[in-house]
Amino acid sequence: MTHSPLLNPAEQAQQRLQALLSDWQATRSVSEAQQEALQDFAQATLPTARDEDWKYTRLAGFWKLPLRWASEQVASSVSLPELSLPDNAIQLVWVNGQFSERLSSSLSDLPSGLSVQIDSAATHLPQSLAGDALAAMAVAGLNSQLVIEVANNQRIERPIVVRCLGEAGVGQSLALSVTLGQSAELTLIEVMSGVSDGVIFMHSQLDVSDNAQLTHLLWHDLADSAYSFGWRTASLQRDARLIQRSLMTSGLLSRQHFTVNVLGENAESNMATGVVALAKQTQDVRTHTRHACLNARSEQLHRFAIGGQANGVFHGDILVEKGADKTDANMATNNLLLSPTAQANSKPQLEIYADDVRCTHGVTSGTLDETQIFYLRARGIPEATARLMVSAAFAQAAVSDVSVPEVAETWQSLIQQKLTEAMS
Amino acid sequence: MLLEVENLQATVAEKEVLRGLNLNIKAGEVHAIMGPNGAGKSSLASVLAGREDYEVTAGSASLNGEDLLDMDPEERAQAGLFLAFQYPVEIPGVSNKLFLQTAVNAVRTAKGLSELDMFEFSQLVQAKMKLLGMRQEFLERDVNVGFSGGEKKRNDMLQMALLEPSLCILDETDSGLDIDALKAVAQGVNAMRSPDRGFVLVTHYQRLLEYVAPDVIHILYQGRIVKSGGMELVAQIEELGYDALATA
């Protein structure tokens, strides 16, 4: 492949990635939507630091990544990293963008009322991502999609665990479509594990019908040089409940969008994120909450513990549409800066077109409270341990109410491990 | 000598707060240090415990013959010094149980003892809580978060009982307490009194001394100990006030 000398590095990257995706598409059947996305990607202008939305999340390194797009072959030697999960969990494992039957739970004895389909035909493509070059790239290169449906009135006791693994240098893109029928209940756990220099794109569409409840837990266990981009869009109908908890501690750069459309009366969204960013990591969390009906609630808490030269980026907007009276929407972001070179960039936004609402947003940024550190040291606790205890508690507090004990324990130790690096 | 302080001088934010303070405490003794506001009472407690915003400009302080001023705050605690705080600090997200177990094991490790496992620690803490009349739920809550003033001080007494220090400094622990909480603090101190342990009760009020009988009372005035004696000093403070007594 040759590059025109007239192209700038971003354009060269685009050309290279486009060729990569074209080659990949040539070897398999792709949907019209994917071809369109490839066109969109070719025509898009790649974001740079001059774009307001990308000012703090720098992609220069990503464009230079020597990616190969996930192929059909899955190395048979790949093994599943140890992970403590509930015994009855239904594990669905993707390796390099391909569903691995060998590593996944059997799909033949699923609980009644639960349907799980693995589909490579890309029929449930995500919508409304126009203008986003990365989203176009993700759609063009979509490897596989998972379609989960829970019938009306079915409470699925077994949590569904979606695990994505990637080998070094592999780019992969997955889509997840989850539909909960009326009064249905489900716990969905997403774990992304990427090996070095790779990227994982994840789109999900979460539809929660009247009076249904979805618990969505998400975390990354990525290598230090991995990239992750996610777009998760939920729609809540009347009396529906969505509980989302995310832990972001790994990867070189991660940007996760969480869109919640609150469409039914008395629906409730409760979202919390714990972030630990160290060294040169960028952890970027973007939330978009749209209230379009009466009497609904949304609660958000985002906590960033940032050390080294890392960057914690938060953008959250809440839109309350005309007529969405009695909306109660609250969004809080707390940043803990663990080093003088750590950066927090938080931008909350409220846009309100209804009359009678209660909406709040707040951002705090600070360093460790030295009186707390002294109190612990005065009881004989070494300084490094004291700092670890207080900073881990800060991040953990956002996600301490995770309803699956195995996940809560894993998260606690991920936070501890990560911060131990920072303190030593 | 348990605690030996000689000609101790210190500043905080470039202000002189201790100006040549001398104090000797033998094991088994309870000393009360009284004085007006701004005399340097809390400064003395802070300097001995190693608060970093205080700068020692001259003098010495040793605990069991070891140079205190050369130690980090955690090393002082491991060497047997305990400071009960005037304002115990709230630490959201850290459970009291984790905090107490971490502290006990840090001190044990420093002494060359093996760490207590969850079961052994649980037995120890239950016994101490019973001694102090504390409820089980204390352990499950975050460190001092949502505790009343009295509960915070009681929690400090529990830490003192668990760490078994050789010198306990109570920095105005009795300030702002109702009579029940004050009695609880006194009960903690009295339960811990022993021939190999010393106490320094830094106090603004004489009320605590009705429940914990000190061996020696010192009057701290303008950064120095200007008078030492027995309970008769309390009556004199009442009668003359600190200024007259200090300059008499």
Image (tube, coloured by chain):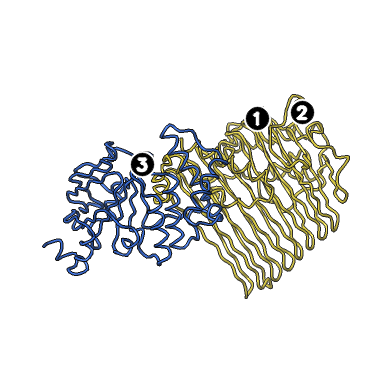
Q: Position of residue A155 (x, y in %)?
A: 81, 54
Q: Position of residue A162 (x, y in %)?
A: 74, 42
Tell me the CA gap for discs 1 and 2.
Answer: 14 Å
Tell me the CA gap for discs 3 and 1.
Answer: 55 Å
Q: Secondary structure at mark 1?
A: loop
User: Label 3 belongs to which residue?
Assistant: B80
User: Label 1 belongs to which residue?
Assistant: A169
Q: Are marks 1 and 2 in contact (CB under 8 Å)?
A: no
Mark whose residue sits in front, 3 or 2: 3
Disc 2 is attached to a residue of which chain? A
Residue B236 in the figure: left or right of residue A190: left
Mark whose residue sits in front, 3 or 1: 3
User: Label 2 belongs to which residue?
Assistant: A74
Tell me: residue B40, above or below residue B68. below
Q: Colour of chain B?
A: blue
Q: Secondary structure at mark 3?
A: loop
Q: Residue at 60%, 51% (x, y): give it.
A: A400
Q: Colour of chain A?
A: yellow
Amino acid under disc 3:
Gly
